[in-house]
Amino acid sequence: MNSAFTEWMAAKQARTEAALGRFLPARDSLPQRLHEAMRYATLGGGKRVRPLLVFAAGELSEAPPERLEVVASAVELIHVYSLVHDDLPAMDDDVLRRGRPTCHIEFDEATALLVGDSLQTLAFELLAGQALGERQIEMIALLAHASGSRGMAGGQAIDLASVGKALTQAELELMHALKTGALIRAAVLLGALAGQSLREQEQRQLDRFAKRAGLLFQVVDDILDCTASTATLGKTAGKDEAADKPTYITLLGLAGARDYAENLRHEALIALSGFGERARRLTELADFICHRPF
Ligand code: GRG
């Protein structure tokens, strides 16, 4: 990673953290325990990949940064809600997230359910309540679709139903296109929608990039789950194998999954080639997603 990109990334992560801190209800406002738990789950951790994608895609369409921080926060709130619910005993049943006890361990299960519910609705309150330009309604609909039963929640349902089953690559890809890919794609498209209109061909190429980047993120997540330590990941490593989940490792083997990730990165970059310098940060982010250590 070059140092200009590292600095850009640190600045956007800090901007996201500050925006989330402002948008979340104050710790001492009622109901205090719920608000404290919402802040605990959201602040002070995570790579903020989705907000980074929002900011990077916003550079393509010259979107105003103050709009992008609203969009980036909304997408991250949906992501954090999904992590809090995914960690519950009824789903993945995990005790460690972002290097700390999961929300239901630090607080309790009922609070964690309400944290997820409240983060999700706060995301839409933000998107609807701030001025985001001419395509605001389209943006709200896009995030809602990406989060619901035909997006992330639907992918999670397929995931839960797939434990112990052998899936084909096409079935695995559909599951991940929904569970992980839909929100990553939404982050990219929303960042671009917050600025000037792109040409139709540019929109198609950006969508192609977004889909490849979403799949790449998941393939690398599978690789890291079986190669990195719990301490590095900040979440329990080796969970896929322990839960007998179909992954890109079970399907392609470790070397095959690495080759596949490299191909996806390459395809993602080809999709951006027509944008030239405007896509510099998106290009660097695809490299980061592919080679990240956690
Ligand atoms: C509960 C509706 C609902 C959905 C859950 C996100 C999700 C769907 C489940 C999480 C399980 C999982 C390991 C998904 C694979 C990819 C993923 C989303 C990893 C976590 O995202 P990162 O690495 O996490 O961006 P940080 O902490 O950096 O934000």
Image (cartoon, rainbow, N blue to C red):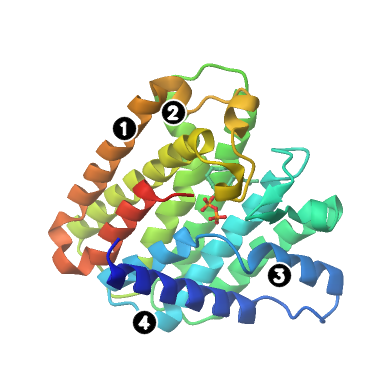
CA separation in Å, label 4 and label 3: 26 Å
Return the disc, 4 or 1, that comes first in the chain's sequence.
4
- Disc 3, ligand 1: is the CB inside 8 Å? no
Say what amino acid the circle numbered 1 marks.
Tyr
- Say whether residue 193 is visible: no
- Say whether residue 196 is visible: yes
Secondary structure at numbered mark 3: helix
According to the picture, the residue beneath numbered tag 3 turns out to be 39
Give coordinates of residue 279: x percent, y percent.
23, 64
Which label was assigned to residue 64? 4
CA separation in Å, label 2 and label 3: 34 Å
Task: Residue at 63% x, 51% y: name it.
Answer: 82
Say what amino acid the circle numbered 4 marks.
Pro
Say what amino acid the circle numbered 3 marks.
Arg
Return the disc, 2 or 3, that comes first in the chain's sequence.
3
According to the picture, the residue beneath numbered tag 1 turns out to be 260
The mark closer to the camera, 2 or 4, is: 2
CA separation in Å, label 2 and label 1: 9 Å
Give coordinates of residue 228: x percent, y percent.
51, 40
Task: Residue at 39% x, 69% y: name it.
Answer: 9
Asked if the residue under mark 1 is in contact with the one under mark 2, i.e. CB atoms within 8 Å, the reply is: yes
According to the picture, the residue beneath numbered tag 2 turns out to be 248
The mark closer to the camera, 4 or 3, is: 3
Say what amino acid the circle numbered 2 marks.
Tyr
Q: Residues within 10 Å of mark 1 (few under 14, many from 20)?
A: some
Of residues 41 and 74, the one nearer the viewer is 41
Give coordinates of residue 254: x percent, y percent.
40, 27
The tally of labels here is 4
Which label was assigned to residue 149? none
